[in-house]
Image (tube, grey):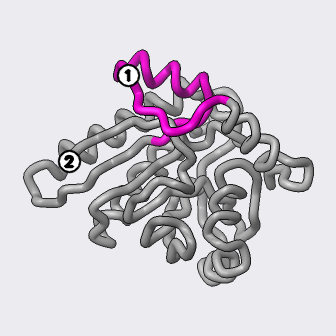
Amino acid sequence: MPFHIIRHDITKVKADAVVNTANPKPVIGSGTDSAIYEAAGKEKLLAEREKIGDIEPGNSAYTPAFDLPAKYIIHCVGTFWEDGAHGEWDILRSCYKTALALAAQLKCKSIAFPLMATGAYGYPKAESLDVALQEIGRFRLKTENKNEDMDIYLVVFDNQALELSSREFGAVEQFIDENYVTDQRAREYAPDRLPNQ
């Protein structure tokens, strides 16, 4: 069950499941959520997301991936960072657990996660990376002898996430550069795409 950290645009990663940092309500937010809707096909994806309805923080649900190079989008609802003393850790852990469990249930051979809740939700990147590594590690240990082989990708985007990941894992394979990140952020965090609180 290989684990990879890569620097990429998650909408371009080929995996059976791509994880979206979703809003609790079926609306399009900013950041990763906006990018995934744009790349998958806004109207089609929103119509499927509306069928699911509200998703509680820490939980996951799935839709088809439509125009993404994936089979499924797993929509995970994270939490806004306050100070770490309001259940943020538990909710983020639950995001990884429920997304991985759902991917296994869907018999996915690969899954790609963004560094969850670190954009509009303001979760500190170092803490989010710690949670991701812990929960992915637990899942890999639990399933390593069960013939549930799944490639797991953690997709980092900006320089800070890249530097933190490189400290943990050494060289991180890069498919995008800082110019690409700057251009994408300007689109994904445009004033008309403010997060829903």
Local packing at callout 1 (Cα closer than 10 Å; few below 14, some 14-19, many 20+) is few
Instruction: Give x and y (percent) for residue 188.
Output: 76, 49
Look at label 2 and name its amino acid: Met
Q: Residue at x 10, y 58 (%)?
A: 146
The residue nearer to you, when weighing 46 against 123, is 46
State left or right for residue 7 relative to residue 143.
Answer: right
Q: For numbered disc 2, what is the local secondary structure?
A: loop
Q: Is residue 117 above or below residue 110?
A: above
Query: What span is in magenta?
Result: 155-178
- Residue 171 marker: 1
Asked if the magenta segment contains residue 150, the reply would be no
Residue matched to label 2 = 1
Taking the image as shown, residue 107 lies to the left or right of residue 60, namely: left
Coordinates of residue 5 in the picture (x, y in percent): 40, 35
Residue 87: assigned label: none
Q: Nearer the viewer, residue 69 or 22?
A: 69
Residue occupying the far left of the picture: 145
Q: Earlier in the sequence, mark 1 or mark 2?
A: 2
Residue at horizontal 63 percent and vertical 60 percent from the top: 36
Q: Amino acid at mark 1?
A: Ala
